[in-house]
Amino acid sequence: MATWSFTTWADDIPTVDHVAYGQARILQQYIKSPRLLSFLEACLDMVQDAEDLAYQMLALRSIYTAVGVQLDTVGKILGYGRPDIFGSSDDLYRVWLLARVIVNRSNGRIEELNLLLHTVGVEDIAILECFPAAMEVHGYNITYVGAVADNLGKAKAAGVALQFVYSVEPKADTFHYSSTYGVAETSATYGYGSRYVATGGVYAGAIRT
């Protein structure tokens, strides 16, 4: 599973001291008027409180900054509750919520499926279109196979059959045949094994959605 580091838009929000900003705009002849300064401070404090609360609400509801129950609420909006397999990890759940955003907007194009798989950390992706209305998706080193297959099934176009060929191991450790017709390939990590030389890799699985 890929490790993600989230930089949020909230980090880039400029902080404005409305009281200081407002008092700095007073005309010079009123700059030493304590009553005017106090009046402005009282009014602008309310503006400051309202703005701070608005930014706080935005941050709590952002997919990038929400945590715990707030992140669960984001999941409900996206139609993807927190699966038990993710435990209590907000960062892991956040990655899959970002994937669900892609799923919800997907029209089943290859670039959309590719982005979905990259988002959840799938390696060595290959997507093949098959006549007349089918696709074959290959991916390796997958941790949550069922979740990936479920999202692919929802992201594909209606009426298109999709077969997901996967391995939970890296591609180098997965069984496959020679990549070139008529040319033998030698490897210590894939191919057929024997009782004399214990070579051979794990098999890939397939899920049809």
Image: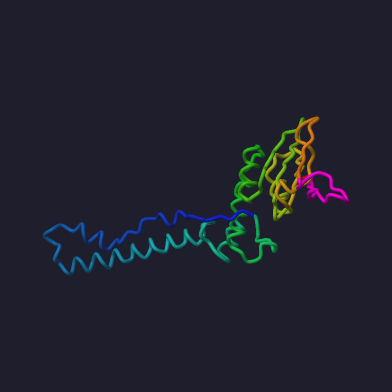
Residue 91 % position (x, y): 58, 60
- The residue at 72%/39% (across/down) is 158
Horizontal relation, residue 176 to residue 59: left or right: right
| Residue farthest front in this picture | 196
Residue 102 shown in magenta: no
Taking the spot 70% from the left edge, 41% from the top edge, the residue there is: 156
Direction left: furthest residue = 29
Q: Main secondary structure of the magenta part?
A: loop
* Quadrant, the N terminus: bottom right
Q: State left or right for residue 78 relative to residue 133.
A: left
Q: Is residue 195 magenta?
A: yes
* Residue 105 drawn above or below residue 37: above
The quadrant of the image that shows the C terminus is top right
Q: Which residues lie in the magenta part?
A: 188-208
Residue 29, image x, y percentages? 11, 60
What residue appears at the point 65 percent right and 61 percent down from the top-left corner?
82
Residue 56 seen by the camera: yes
Quadrant in which residue 23 is drawn? bottom left
Q: Nearer the viewer, residue 48 or 135?
A: 135
Question: Of residues 64 and 126, which is closer to you in this image?
Answer: 126
